């Protein structure tokens, strides 16, 4: 028999607990949070899949009434946070994304312990953007990729 193993009661409780922690009140309506420990959601643009051979840890998918609100991906690497950010960002730039220079974003150079490095990239024609945040950890670095698709209202103005 192939396929995923059935979820245990402990795993179901852990998923319910994590979903409760990750949900937040939204004046526009109830949103759902789906945890994907090792998997990419079907509606993720293919260029956001890692091209830098980083260790993919999983994703969080947020929806409201079936509409995709955002996807967060988590990667890790043994090196430092700046190298991690640059490796992932380079893959996006090679696939037609553009870096956005935003004042106040900390990038490169000397960073105190635990400081996050950030970058914003956009696909102008599709009106989509990603926020990248990397930080050093005890045994390497983590990269959070926040994907924000255009909302239905934004698509109506295209």
Image (cartoon, rainbow, N blue to C red):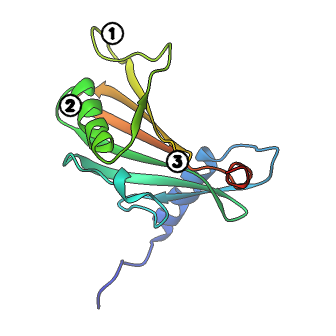
State whether residue 132 is above or below residue 20.
above
Q: Are marks 3 and 1 in contact (CB under 8 Å)?
A: no
In screen coordinates, is 88 left or right of 32? left
Q: How many marks?
A: 3
Residue under label 3, please give it: 125
Q: Nearer the viewer, residue 98 or 112?
A: 98
State whether residue 105 is above or below residue 18.
above
Q: Position of residue 53 (x, y in %)?
A: 19, 49
Q: Position of residue 123 (x, y in %)?
A: 47, 44
Q: Nearer the viewer, residue 90 or 70?
A: 90
For discs 2 and 3, the disc positioned in front in the rendered view = 3
In screen coordinates, is 51 left or right of 67? left
Q: At x 21% / y 45%, what residue is drawn?
A: 52
State whether residue 105 is above or below residue 17.
above
Dot 1: what SS? Answer: loop
Mark 1 neighbour class, 10 Å CA radius: few under 14, some 14 to 19, many 20 or more? few
Between the residue at mark 1 and the residue at mark 2, the CA separation in whole angstroms equals 16 Å
Mark 2 neighbour class, 10 Å CA radius: few under 14, some 14 to 19, many 20 or more? few
Q: At x 81% / y 48%, what residue is drawn?
A: 28
Please tell me which of labels 1 and 2 falls first in the chain: 1
Please tell me which of labels 2 and 3 falls first in the chain: 3
Residue under label 1, please give it: 112
Q: At x 27% / y 10%, what residue is drawn?
A: 109
To which quarter of the image does residue 68 belong? Answer: bottom right
Between the residue at mark 2 and the residue at mark 3, the CA separation in whole angstroms equals 39 Å
To which quarter of the image does residue 93 belong? Answer: top left
Q: Position of residue 37 (x, y in %)?
A: 39, 58
Which label number is shown at residue 158?
none
Which label number is shown at residue 139?
2
């Amino acid at each position: 028999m192939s396929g995923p193993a059935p979820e245990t009661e402990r795993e179901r409780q852990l998923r319910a607990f994590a979903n409760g922690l990750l949900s937040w009140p939204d004046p526009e309506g109830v949103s759902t949070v789906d945890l994907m420990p090792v998997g990419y959601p079907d509606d993720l643009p293919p260029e956001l899949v890692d091209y830098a051979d980083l260790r993919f840890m999983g994703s969080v998918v947020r929806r409201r009434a079936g509409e995709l609100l955002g996807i967060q991906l988590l990667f890790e690497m043994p090196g430092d946070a700046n190298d991690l950010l640059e490796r992932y960002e380079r893959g996006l730039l090679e696939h037609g994304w553009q870096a956005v220079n935003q004042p106040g974003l900390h990038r490169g150079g000397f960073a105190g312990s635990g400081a996050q490095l950030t970058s914003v990239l956009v696909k102008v024609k599709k009106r989509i953007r990603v926020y990248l945040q990397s930080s050093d950890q005890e045994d390497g670095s983590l990269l959070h990729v926040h994907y924000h698709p255009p909302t239905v209202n934004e698509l109506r103005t295209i």
